[in-house]
Image (cartoon, rainbow, N blue to C red):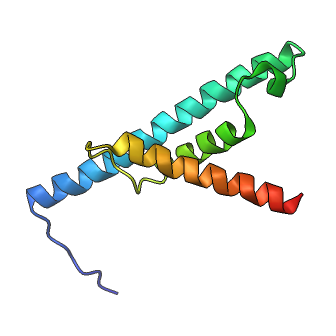
């Protein structure tokens, strides 16, 4: 079966390459942050201190942080400036609120 050949201009190739590179870098950054967080939690647990007590973070903040990690790792959101940080933080907060509401309904 013959596979059709696609010809790309240099500009098209550079655009595709830049998009893929941005996704890879965003995923790598998120993964490194998660590794750092896990390492810190393991150190706390190894010292015999409960992670929840040792951390000043509440459940809602934990949910928001995980939502933010997922949003950024998805590759669907790109920092375009113009209030991007506030926008993505609001989305993470909305997800955290929904998760808290679902927990309350379940209880």
Q: Is residue 70 visible?
A: no
Can residue 33 be spotted in the picture? yes
Can you name the residue that lies furthest to the bottom here?
A: 1
The C terminus, quarter of image: bottom right
Outermost residue to the top: 47
Left or right? Give the position of 61 relative to 94.
Answer: right
Give the residue drawn at x 40%, y 42%.
86
Q: Is residue 85 above or below residue 94?
A: above
Q: Residue at (85%, 17%) from the top-left corner?
A: 46
Residue 97 position, x and y percent, is 65, 52
Vertical order, 92 against 40 (above or below): below
Residue 22, how many percent across, how many down?
Answer: 33, 45
The x and y percentages for residue 23 are 38, 48
Q: Quadrant of the N terminus?
A: bottom left
Q: Quadrant of residue 48?
A: top right
Total residue callouts = 0
Could you say where residue 7 lies in the image, as x and y percent from the top left?
14, 70
Q: On the rendered structure, is 47 left or right of 74?
A: right
């Amino acid at each position: 079966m013959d596979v059709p050949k696609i010809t790309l201009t240099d500009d098209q190739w550079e655009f595709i390459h830049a998009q893929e590179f941005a996704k890879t870098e965003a995923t790598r950054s998120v993964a490194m942050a998660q590794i750092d967080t896990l390492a810190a939690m393991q150190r706390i647990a190894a010292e015999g201190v409960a992670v929840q007590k040792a951390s000043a973070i509440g459940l809602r903040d934990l949910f928001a942080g995980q939502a933010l990690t997922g949003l950024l790792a998805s590759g669907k959101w790109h920092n375009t400036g113009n209030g991007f940080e506030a926008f993505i933080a609001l989305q993470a907060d909305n997800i955290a609120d929904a998760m808290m509401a679902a927990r309350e309904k379940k209880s």
